[in-house]
């Protein structure tokens, strides 16, 4: 059972917009700790997509964005493309566990 | 670029050591973290080591059988996990937090090291 909760799967057609939620609690996201997102394709290491809730590393297209509300964060992907098919993980820090925590991951399927 | 050592096979009850070369020194990173992923499963944080000080923060689940060290002269970090069981079979990643960052997020990842524990 992951500390951060994500939906197991989402899907969308090319060109559409999808969102992936990441819900935590008062000891992690709700406590103000940054939320970070990673994209992982089969056989590869995760790749940083968003850091500190809504910042993109260089090279990540502006089709990827994130927003926060209370103890929940949402990753939005617009203008969906076939190569966006991947597993997306959120990550934060939990002060009561003193641990880095991850969501269980969400598999995005482009129809 | 972060480069890890190759795959390992161990018997239950033994130990494994995985290396992670970060750079010629640890100047450019705040910490080196270790994360594992079991086949078809999610990501699990194991612990971190601060490059400069060598201070560590270990996940409680592992702290009695986990050792994180680093060699300043080669810019290499090491994970050693003892009392292995089949549940430790996973891909082990090292990942770095950028220098100067207080938030813990991972901007560079190693290629992963598959550790298989089997009798």
Image (spheres, helix red, strand yellow):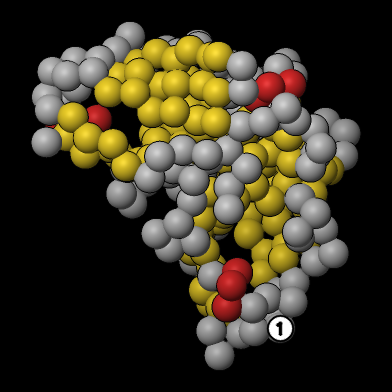
Vertical arrangement, residue B60 with respect to residue A77, above or below = below
Residue A107 screen position, x and y as percent = 32, 42
Please give the name of the residue rendered at 72% of the width and 27% of the height, measured from the top-left corner: A26
Please give the name of the residue rendered at 17% of the width and 34% of the height, measured from the top-left corner: A110
Residue B88 screen position, x and y as percent = 60, 69
Check disc 1 and report its element: helix, strand or loop: loop
Residue B81 quadrant: bottom right
* Front-lying residue, A18 or B79: A18
Q: Is residue A33 left or right of residue B1?
A: right
Q: Is residue B111 left or right of residue A40?
A: right
* Front-lying residue, B12 or B52: B12
Q: Which residue is mark 1?
A: B13
Please give the name of the residue rendered at 34% of the width and 23% of the height, measured from the top-left corner: A19
Quadrant assignment for the C terminus of chain B: bottom right
Residue A41 screen position, x and y as percent = 31, 42
Please give the name of the residue rendered at 67% of the width and 31% of the height, measured from the top-left corner: A25
Residue A68 quadrant: top right
Task: Give the chain letter at badge 1.
Answer: B
Residue B100 screen position, x and y as percent = 72, 16
Q: Is residue B105 left or right of residue A108?
A: right
Vertical arrangement, residue B99 with respect to residue A108, above or below = above
């Amino acid at each position: 059972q992951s500390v951060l909760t994500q939906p197991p799967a989402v899907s969308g057609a090319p060109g559409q917009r999808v969102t992936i939620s990441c819900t935590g609690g008062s000891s992690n996201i709700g406590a103000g700790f940054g939320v970070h997102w990673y994209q992982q394709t089969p056989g590869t290491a995760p790749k940083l997509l968003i850091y500190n809730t809504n910042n993109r590393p260089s090279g990540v297209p502006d089709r990827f964005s994130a927003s926060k509300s209370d103890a929940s964060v949402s990753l939005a992907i617009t203008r969906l493309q076939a190569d966006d098919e991947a597993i997306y993980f959120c990550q934060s820090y939990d002060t009561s566990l003193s641990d880095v925590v991850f969501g269980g991951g969400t598999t995005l399927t482009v129809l | 670029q972060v480069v890890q050592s190759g795959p390992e096979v161990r018997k239950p009850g033994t130990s494994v050591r995985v290396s992670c070369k970060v750079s010629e020194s640890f100047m450019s990173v705040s910490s080196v973290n270790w994360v594992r992923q079991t086949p078809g499963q999610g990501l699990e944080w194991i612990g971190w080591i601060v490059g400069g000080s060598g201070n560590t923060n270990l996940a409680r689940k592992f702290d009695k059988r986990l050792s994180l060290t680093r060699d300043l002269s080669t810019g290499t970090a090491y994970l050693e996990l003892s009392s292995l069981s089949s549940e430790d079979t996973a891909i082990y990643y090292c990942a770095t937090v950028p220098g100067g960052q207080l938030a813990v997020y991972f901007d560079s990842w190693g290629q992963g090291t598959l550790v298989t524990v089997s009798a």
